[in-house]
Image: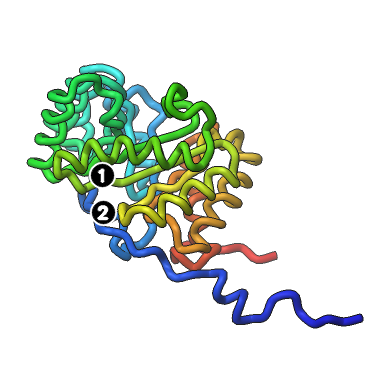
Amino acid sequence: MDTGPVFTLEQVKESFRERRRSRAVKVGSVTIGGGAPVSVQSMCTTATADVDATVEQIRRLKDAGCDIVRVAVPDMDSARAIARIKACVDVPLVADVHFNYRLALAALESGADKLRLNPGNIKKPEHVRLVVKEAKARGVPIRVGVNEGSIDRTRYPEATPEALVASAMDHIRILEELEFKDVVVSLKAFDVPKTVRAYMLMAEQTDYPLHIGITEAGLPWSGTIRSAVGLGALLAMGIGDTLRVSLAADPVEEVRVGIEILKSLNLRSGGYTLIV
């Protein structure tokens, strides 16, 4: 017996919600959140201290449509190289720093437009204060980035969506206690439903802009599918202010996939779509 459609047209329309309201954060010339277009990010695979190779890759990323580029800062040479790289490109640069507050300070001095740094990983509170003070003075935001491998398993034995959110909030509270609010948040897992659930929970708790992605998404074919499913689900719910597709491939491919995901949801225009 025909029982009629499972979903009405109005229900389908409702499933594609308006974008979540988030505060605006400036990353160089690009705004994340606050109703700004969803930006696409990638990360250089070059050694940051190799300025020529890094500049060449950033230019390729920009030509592909990348809005923001992250570079690794594992040592002082890499931190200092940011100044020379910025002199050659006009794409905002994010300095990826772990544990060492001196590298964060050096990256800021070199002109990094944003830090990817979890303040809870810096052991001494006075060192966190130094980094936050300098970031605030320069108008540089900080991305708190939590993934399954980074949460404190002594506090959160299982990397559940709730644990990812709680871990991120631990770092965020450190920044808020120092009256620092230029924060972007990411919560990434390999498991797509877990990642989607974590972002849904975080979206209910804060108005910070959200950097969405699926961590270690994988080789180009499978990684593209995992990212399209996970990021597409979030974006269709109105969640996500900037994104990165993580692939074990040329980072230019990450950008192309990210742009296609946005175009498929009418969140980005430009270029051509081949229909066969």
Residue 83 drawn at (x, y percent): 17, 31
Residue at 57 percent of width and 63 percent of height: 273
For marks 1 and 2, give the CA distance: 7 Å
N-term mark: 1 or 2: 2
- Residue type for callout 1: Pro
Q: Is residue 247 visible?
A: no
Q: Identify the coloring.
A: rainbow
Q: Quadrant of the C terminus?
A: bottom right
Estimate how packed mark 1 is, as few (under 14), some (14 to 19) or many (20 or more) residues with alpha carbons within 10 Å: many
- Residue type for callout 2: Val
Q: Quadrant of the N terminus?
A: bottom right
The single residue placed furthest to the right in the displayed view is: 1
User: Is 28 or 116 nearer to us in this picture?
Assistant: 116
Query: Tag 1, which secondary structure?
Result: loop
- Mark 1 near mark 2, Cβ–Cβ under 8 Å? yes
Say which residue label 2 marks. 30
Residue 85 drawn at (x, y percent): 23, 33
Residue 129 drawn at (x, y percent): 13, 30
Say which residue label 1 marks. 92
Query: Tag 2, which secondary structure?
Result: strand
> Which dot marks residue 57?
none
User: Is 121 or 41 nearer to us in this picture?
Assistant: 121
